[in-house]
Amino acid sequence: MKRFILFLFTALIFALNAFAQNDSLTFVKAQWETKKIAPGVKWKHYWFKNNLFHSNQNINILEINPRRKANLALGYEVKKLKPVADFAAESNAIAAINGGFFDVKNGGSVDLIKVDGIGLEPNHLTKNGGRVDHQKGALLFYNNILSISKWDGTPDWESKLKGDIMVAGPVLIYHNVMEHLDTASAFIKTRNPRTGIAVTKNRVLLITIDGRNDNAAGVTIVEMAKIVKWLNAQDGINLDGGGSTTMWVKGTTPNNVVNYPTDNKKWDHEGVRKVANVVLVQKR
């Protein structure tokens, strides 16, 4: 009996490893639709038809070469909420994605936003002063370079960071090491639309993954981390997802939204949600 149980356990582990390997091969071998948006900026898209994580997955990626004539910047509103498209238009951007977590009712970020050394929004910590997962990482915008930082465990961590700051998270991979994620957390283990950023050796990747639809299941945070790893990222971070997930690329669809936002519960480009902050791609 013990031998039989051991056999079943071994077979299960083998099967799970095989599935994981199939997913990585499926992702790496995908023939992405690719369009040049501007010097140093490419838009890539692929719709996996029931063959990634045993589900449909619709993924868009903006690939930015920061050494070319492209600049990444933080867009924000202190209290107002507005569509990603409005942030992009007002900043003369060529592309944009939604940013960090925010107060849907009252507007403004729930995590620290700091611009030109001035704190515009503080972290809204828990009652005992603790940090939730999306307050344990940050995007840094400094000298036309976007980088990712990981909370060092100290309460004044943000004061040590340079440049404009958008706190977000969780961090998915840091300095080539996959981060530990709490798989018991509903936030981590539930499939949803996701937005994230990955930094490779010479590229910055802005990523949206659609969900909440038969055409696109969405991913867990763990699955998001795997995708970031398969993109050869050295660092990667999760941003606000769900109904906020939006990618705007100038000169593409009629409203320039290339993913399928979910607030109207339709498979179209119209169901965008108003947000408090964004990541902008601008011509330098």
Image: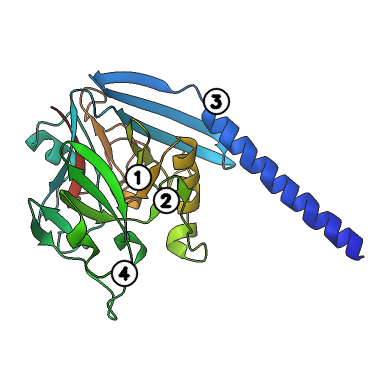
- Amino acid of disc 2: Leu
Query: Residue at label 4?
Result: 131
| Among numbered discs 3 and 2, the one appearing first in the sequence | 3
Tag on residue 196? 1
Tag on residue 29? 3
Task: Check contact, mark 2 vs mark 1: CB within 8 A.
Answer: yes
Q: Label 1 crowding class (10 Å Cα cut-off): few <14, some 14-19, many 20+?
A: many
The percent position of residue 180, horizontal first and vertical second, equals 48, 58
| Among numbered discs 1 and 3, the one appearing first in the sequence | 3
Q: CA distance from mark 2 to mark 4?
A: 16 Å
Residue 201 in sight in this render:
yes
| Among numbered discs 2 and 4, the one appearing first in the sequence | 4
Q: Label 2 crowding class (10 Å Cα cut-off): few <14, some 14-19, many 20+?
A: many
Q: CA distance from mark 3 to mark 4?
A: 38 Å
- Amino acid of disc 1: Gly
- Amino acid of disc 4: Arg
Query: Residue at label 2?
Result: 172
The percent position of residue 281, horizontal first and vertical second, equals 20, 33
Label 3: element kind: loop
Q: Residue at x 39, y 47 (%)?
A: 193
